[in-house]
Amino acid sequence: MKKALVTGGAGFIGSHLCDLLVGKGFEVVCVDNLLTGSKKNLENLIKNPNFKFLKADVTQPIKQLAGRQINFLFHLASPASPVDYQIHSEETALANSLGTLNMLKTALANKAKFLFASTSEIYGDPKEHPQKETYWGNVNSFGPRACYDESKRFGEAITYVYIHKYNLDARIIRIFNTYGPRMQKDDGRVVSNFINQALLEKPLTIYGEGKQTRSFCFVSDLVNGIFRAMFSEGTGGKIFNLGNPEEYKIIDLAKKIKKLTGSKSKVVFKPLPKDDPKQRRPDITKAKNILGWEPKVSVDEGLKKTIEYYKGLR
Ligand SMILES: NC(=O)c1ccc[n+]([C@@H]2O[C@H](COP(=O)([O-])OP(=O)(O)OC[C@H]3O[C@@H](n4cnc5c(N)ncnc54)[C@H](O)[C@@H]3O)[C@@H](O)[C@H]2O)c1
C-alpha cells in the first residue's frame, strides 16, 4: 500500500485531500499542529485504519515520522486566510520557509515525490491578466501580506533548489481562491463572510466598490487537480495554476449569495484593505494540457453545498 503524507491535513483543503487519498486506497499520515485546522475536519477518517493523525509542527524536526517510508508528500501546512496569517504572521512565514525546507528534506530522505501548495498570492497585485505560470508577479516584500506572499515565494525557490541540486521529483501548485465545506466560518474570506452574513440577515460587507474580481474554485475540483499534479506523467519540476477561470465581480457574488440564501441582508461598502489585488484569474491552459484537468462544479452548485454546510453548523 502506498503511503502519503499530507501536512496541514486537518485544515480546509488538506482534510478533503486526505479524504480523497484514503478513498483511493492510500495509507495517509496527516501532520498538523492544529494552528488553524481542526480534528473535526477529520471526523470521517479518524477511526480508519489507513489514516494516522500526528500532531506536529512542520517547522520542527518530526520524530514520529522516522521509519514511516513515505512515498508521496503533499506540503499544505500554512495558515491561508488573510485573518489567520495576520494573527499568525511569524508562524506563517516559517511554515512556508523553514517548514518547506524540512518537508523537502523529509521527501529526499524517503525518496518520496513532493508537492508544494503555493498560491496565486505570489502574483501579488498582477499587471498581467489572466495570470500564467510564467508571470513573475507584482509583490510587496515589506507589507502586511508579505509574511504569506513572500514566504510562499521562498517555498517555491527552495523547492526549485531541491529539484535542481538533488534531483528531487517535486512539483508546485499555485492555488487560486478555493471555497467549500470546512472553510472556517470567520476566516475573513469573501465566500464565508457573505454566506454567514446572509444567513444571519446581517449586512454583506464589500471592500471598495465591489468591482474587484475574483475566481472561485470548489474544493472537490481543487483536490482532484492536486491529485493529478502529483500522479500524472511528466509533472516533476513543473508549476501549475489550479483554480477556476470564471471571473466574478465581488458585488455580483454578493447578489448571488443573497439570492441563493433567500436573505434580505443589505450590502454595505468599506474601504479597500492595503495591497488588495484588483483582479485575479488563473490561466489554466497548462493544467488542462498536462493534467487533463479543469473545474467541473459550477459556482451555483458549489455555493449551495457550502451554504448547506454552514447551515449545519448553526
Ligand atoms: N484556501 C485557499 O483558497 C487557498 C488559496 C491559495 C493557497 N492555499 C494554500 O493551501 C494550503 C491549505 O490552505 P487551507 O485553506 O486549507 O488553510 P487552513 O488554514 O484551513 O489549513 C492549513 C492547515 O495547516 C496547519 N498548519 C499551519 N501551520 C502549521 C505548522 N507549522 N505545522 C503543521 N501544521 C500547520 C493548520 O493547523 C491547518 O490545519 C495552504 O498552504 C494555503 O497557503 C489555499
Image (cartoon, rainbow, N blue to C red):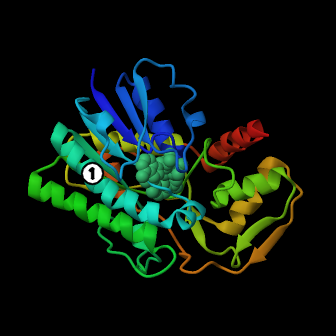
Which type of secondary structure does the marked residue at label 1 adopt? helix
Q: Mark 1 points at which residue?
A: 102
Please say if 261 is above or below 269: above
Residue 54 seen in render = yes
The residue that appears at 51% across and 57% down in the rendered structure is 80
User: Is 46 on the left-hand or right-hand side of 302?
Assistant: left
**Dividing the image into 4 quarters, which one contains the C terminus?**
top right
Residue in the picture at 16% in, 55% down: 163
Horizontal side of 276 relative to 121 (left or right) equals right
Q: Residue 214's spot in the image, x, y percent?
A: 57, 65
The percent position of residue 246, horizontal first and vertical second, equals 54, 58
Q: Nearer the viewer, residue 255 or 273?
A: 273
Question: Between residues 72 and 195, which one lies in front from this camera angle?
Answer: 72
Q: In which quarter of the image is the N terminus?
A: top left
Answer few, some or many: residues within 10 Å of disc 1's Cα (few below 14, many 20 plus, some between 14 and 19): some
| Picture coordinates of residue 208, whole percent (x, y) | 69, 78
Amino acid residing under circle 1: Asn
Residue 61 against residue 165 in the figure, above or below:
above
Please say if 278 is above or below 225. Answer: below
At 37% from the left edge and 66% from the top edge, which residue is drawn?
151
Q: Which residue is drawn at 37% across and 29% down?
A: 28
The verdict on label 1 being within 8 Å of ligand 1 is: no
